[in-house]
Amino acid sequence: MRSIPQSILVVGINHNTTSDHSSITITLSLPSSLEKITPQHAWHKATWDAFTSHSQSADMDISNLGAKEDTLHAISNITILIHQAIDIAVPFREPGKKVAPWWIHSLMLAKRAVKQADSHAGQNPTAINREDTHLKCSHWSTMVQQAKNTYRIKQVQSASTTTV
């Protein structure tokens, strides 16, 4: 676990508030929980014959719908039937490879610091704020290159003569 001082990204004091007090803003880099990945269907691998077979097996007759409630009930049943047929006929796809496998948590934090500095420079465009944005952006670019190089080196080191 990181110590508190290492977790502090930005500390700011704003004297221009409507109160007689100044506000202090502290931005922390706390570990975030991973978002749940929503499984997605692999539509290109669908078995449409199975979909059709399941849909037709319900043998629904919607020709004699009288009242509004009958129509709404039929729509609900058809929707349920379609979802069931999709579950049967369309498999879920495997989670794909990361778009950037070299991306690491520290890059996210550095990118966030660049965005915050850029926003701050936009709100208060002083030479110091623009320089801060430039330095953070330059640092982030260097970190990205280092992360890519480290990833590539690890890939080469882990490769064998049969996997190259």
Image: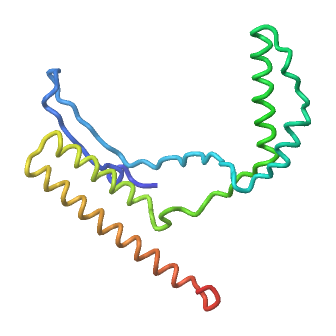
Left/right placement of residue 106 relative to residue 155 reads left
- Taking the view exactly as shown, the residue that stands out farthest to the bottom is 161
- Taking the view exactly as shown, the residue that stands out farthest to the front is 63
The x and y percentages for residue 102 are 46, 68
- Taking the view exactly as shown, the residue that stands out farthest to the left is 127
Q: Look at the picture and state if 109 lies above or below 59.
A: below
Tally of numbered tags: 0
Residue in the foreground of this view, choosing between 67 and 136:
67
Q: Look at the picture and state if 93 lies above or below 80.
A: below
Residue in the foreground of this view, choosing between 135 and 87:
87
Which quarter shows the C terminus?
bottom right
Left/right placement of residue 1 relative to residue 87 reads left
Colour setup of the view: rainbow
The x and y percentages for residue 95 are 63, 57
What residue is at 66 percent from the left and 48 percent from the top? 39
What residue is at 62 percent from the left and 45 percent from the top? 38
The x and y percentages for residue 74 are 80, 20
Left/right placement of residue 9 relative to residue 78 reads left
Quarter location, residue 141 = bottom left
Residue in the foreground of this view, choosing between 19 and 48:
48
What residue is at 11 percent from the left and 44 percent from the top? 125
What residue is at 36 percent from the left and 73 percent from the top? 146
